[in-house]
Image (cartoon, rainbow, N blue to C red):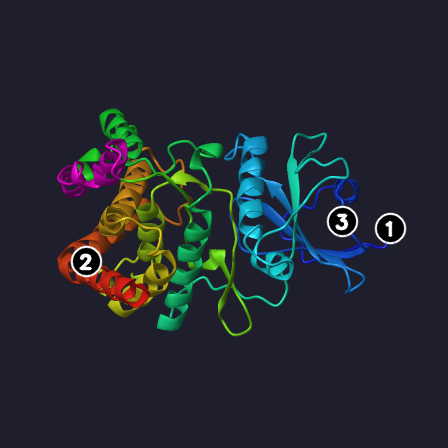
Amino acid sequence: MSNVQYMNLNHQTPKNVETIIDRFNIEGKIIEIKAFGSGHINDTYLLKNENDSYPDYLLQRINHSIFTNVPGLMKNIQLVTDHLKSKLSEAAAATEVLTIVPLHRGELFYKDEEGNYWRIFHFIKDTNSYDLVEKEVQANEGGKAFGRFQAMLADLDASLLIEPIPNFLNIEMRLNRFYQALENDSAARKHIVTEEIEYINARTEQMKTILKLGREGKLPLRITHNDTKFNNVLLNKNDEVQCVIDLDTVMPGFVAYDFGDAIRTIINSASEDEKELDKIKLNIPLFEAYTIGYLREACHFLTDIEVESLMHGVLLFPYMQAVRFLTDYLEDDVYYKISFKEHNLQRTKAQIKLLKEIEAHATQLSSIVNTVYSEIKSEVA
């Protein structure tokens, strides 16, 4: 590794990077290391191989302040990727599923002397990812990606996986934190947000619907991705879905979580923190395109009540994000990075406006889900 080149490093390059890489069972000779991607959680580096006959790799420093159980996290990813690969040909498995590179002694990660955790994946070449969904064909491919992901994991026992971030999508926990922040009012801001508090209070029981259905045994616990942003889908050169990535939050959950999270990020015509609330409108064609892609892949394993729950997820996620932003605002902006003093309040208002738009069009959106589901079921019957 003496001829390794270090290029475009936006993160502090670890002094012991060569030692770290040498611990892993990689093939070939790494000749270039450069920072890669736009992720905010883990530090990622692309390792360029000297010989094109060997793969390039992605080296990641796992943020163990967020993912405190790294062995459990990596075991989750191994269980999921092994299961996905078992359903594909060898060639397809290499390009359509993430491949973990173990250490020489077989472990899935390396802990260095400074207490940092490292892992390596194969880099999947000739793929693209996009931060924003702009076209219906893109939304459709995103729906296909996460529908197929859930469908291929539907027969894997969800109890085998841990929760890498406990209660990550538990709205009751988020509301408890919100009410504690209200009680403490540490930043003396409660009086500013009375309208937002009233809006949130009026919907607390409605937003617990998915949790209640799960506790009643009406919604099965599935293996879900839990971070269904469009940039977590790799597309091939023809912009067709190839691989779902960023598996750190894969855990037991409900299908409506993945659906609602994806819809929140694609249906909004404006940014997440849009100041001019009148600009926040729904892109319903994108909603329909995603729904078609998702249900075409997932309808064969979903129960009728799971399909009914999808709209609960669509309503829940902007609500939950508003709760989280407003909680942070009340706590004096300790979690989310802000660009100005009222940033979290502006985000809260934008998410509430998005939810109001969804509520106003809920009948239309539900009709789209039900119609698409019925049509696809009729096709496959």
Q: Quadrant of residue 23?
A: top right
Counting residues from the N terminus, which is met first, the one under dot 2 or under dot 1? 1
Label 1: how many residues lie within 10 Å, few (<14), some (14-19) or many (20+)?
few
**Is 187 displayed left or right of 55 in the figure?**
left
Q: Is residue 148 above or below residue 332?
A: below
Q: Amino acid at mark 3?
A: Ile
Q: Closer to the camera, 112 or 120?
A: 120
Can residue 270 be found in the magenta stretch?
no
The numbered mark, 2 or 3, whose residue comes first in the sequence reads 3
Image spot of residue 186 (x, y percent): 29, 28
Say whether residue 162 is visible.
no
Of 321 and 158, the residue lying toward us: 158
Q: At x 33% / y 46%, what residue is drawn?
A: 257
Classify 10 Å Cα crowding around label 3: few (below 14), some (14-19), many (20 and above): many
- For the residues bearing labels 3 and 1, Cβ distance under 8 angstroms: no
Q: Residues within 10 Å of mark 2 (few under 14, many from 20)?
A: some
The segment highlighted magenta reads: 193-218
- Viewer-nearest of discs 2 and 1: 2
Q: Quadrant of the C terminus?
A: bottom left
Image-based side of 75 in relation to 184, left or right: right
Q: Is residue 366 left or right of residue 52?
A: left
Residue highlighted by disc 1: 2
Residue under label 3, please give it.
Answer: 26
From the image, state whether disc 3 or disc 1 is nearer to you. Answer: 3
Along the viewing direction, whichever of 225 and 205 lies nearer the viewer:
225
